[in-house]
Amino acid sequence: MEDNGAVSRFGTRIHITALDGIIHVNSLFTIAVFIGLAWQPTDPNADFVDDPTCAATVKIAEDLVVFHVYSFSSFLFSSIIALGLKQVIRMVKPVNDNHRRIFTIEVAHINRTALRIGYLVSAIGSASGCICLMLALINMVQIKLGTFGCGSIHIYGAVVPLLILVPSALLFYVCVVFYAFTR
């Protein structure tokens, strides 16, 4: 790394690969959100709740849609920031070669602090999208299997792993982003 605050050419290639990863993962989650939004949550033939007192309320169905929209906007925000950073890192430079104009891709020297802040903002968008998607899934479970107040083992069997695995993965992700942010 250079000492003038710029990222070396090798470092920027690694950053471009990391940004591609963020964009691809966000795209997969965005597809999941669209599938969730296309699903009709109030279809009476699509749930396993026999007891009407255990049926999800309209508020739970509304929250399902709201959390899907929050999740979509968070993933979209994160992806756009990542794409912007990628465009800043890669710059197209025209080169004259025997009176022909060809374009080569040059890797730019950018400010390390700006890159770190961009990564941090993109990571925050991805993490908040994951949290909102998890909350939407919890609402979907309540619509399909009944509310938490009914105490069905199936409800807790679906939600407890979700509440353990997603925050654990997010904690790991935040630690890695924090580590990269401080280096």
Image: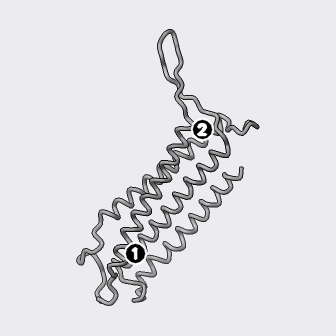
Please, which residue is most extreme toward the top here? 98
Image point 27% across, 69% down: which residue?
40
Mark 2 or mark 1: name the one nearer the start of the chain: 2
Mark 2 sits on what residue? 13
Amino acid at circle 1: Asn
Percent x, y for residue 123?
56, 55
| Residue 58, horizontal then vertical, whole percent | 32, 79
Q: Quadrant of residue 152?
A: bottom left
Residue 167: where, in percent of width, then height? 55, 69
* Amino acid at pointer 2: Arg
Disc number lying in front (2 or 1):
1
- In the image, taking residue 18 as reference, residue 175 lies left or right, namely right
Q: Residues within 10 Å of mark 2 (few under 14, many from 20)?
A: some
| Mark 1 neighbour class, 10 Å CA radius: few under 14, some 14 to 19, many 20 or more | many
Q: Residue at x 66, y 40 (%)?
A: 111
Tell me where residue 135 appears, x and y as whole percent: 45, 71
The residue sitting at the right extreme is 3
Query: Where does the N terminus fall, quadrant-wise?
Result: top right
The kind of secondary structure element at disc 1 is: helix
Taking the spot 42% from the left edge, 84% from the top edge, the residue there is 148
Mark 2 secondary-structure assignment: helix
Seen in the picture, residue 77 relative to 41 is either above or below; the reply is: above
Is the residue 67 above or below the residue 156 in the image?
A: above
Given residues 165 and 52, the one toward you in this image is: 52
